[in-house]
Image (cartoon, grey):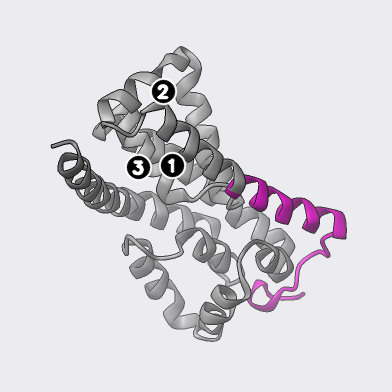
Amino acid sequence: MTSPQRNQGKPLSSRTQKLIHAASIVGAVLTVVFIIWAYKKGLFTSKEVLSEYMQRAGFWGPPLFILLQILQTVVPIIPGALTSIAGVYIYGEWVGNIYNYIGIIIGSIIAFALARKYGQLFVKSIVSKRTYDRYIGWLDKENRFDYFFIFMMLFPVSPDDFLCMLAALTKMTYKKFIIIILLCKPVTLAAYTYGMTFIIDTIWSHFSR
């Protein structure tokens, strides 16, 4: 039996690979379009204005936001940093981070499962060659990978979505993976969103004088 350590995975069809790449491109374009549209609408004048406008979605707002977080975790349709910060601004620090947490945890488990099933071929179709080549060597350090993974999950600016897929290429069990991300993600989210919102608030206050 082939070990997940070097499992090449089931071959992805060329159509699937094209769809993944197309989704990433479309997501990047839509992100730029949204930023331009929101700027013209004046939604970036303050976080209160942005929150009030986005909450008009009503009941469907939270589940749609969580779904967006799940999708961006599995496939980089929209930068995860953007959606996480948006969640805090729209729903508040506590509720926003809870929605972020739910979506990212579910998305991370799905990404792990897909990488475990389809192996390196799937991972390579998701991330850049530069990122892949930078971290793939950790697969040869089986005894140390778990500690490395925990450390990176606690590091706010690590490529955590990719590292969740990388973990699936090792012998890490689902149980261990889920426990690690359940415990580490709240710390990472709190540190990242607090730091970034502080910077953005400072910039906003500077330009609103």
Badge 3 vs badge 1, beta-carbon distance below 8 Å? yes
Residue at disc 1, secondary structure: helix
For mark 2, what is the residue?
Answer: 54
Q: CA distance from mark 3 to mark 1?
A: 6 Å
Residue at disc 3, secondary structure: helix
Verify whether residue 19 appears in magenta. Answer: yes
Residue at disc 2, secondary structure: helix
Return the x and y of residue 166 as percentages of the image width and height.
Answer: 56, 68
Verify whether residue 180 appears in magenta. Answer: no
Label drawn at residue 83: 1
Circle 1 residues within 10 Å: few <14, some 14–19, many ≥20: some
Image quadrant where residue 50 sits? top left
Q: Amino acid at mark 3?
A: Ile
86 lies above or below 123: above
Per the rendered image, the range of residues in magenta is 1-28
- Drawn side of residue 200 relative to residue 1, left or right: left
For mark 3, what is the residue?
Answer: 85
Work out whether residue 82 or residue 206 is closer to the camera in this orientation and state it. Answer: 206
118 lies above or below 62: below
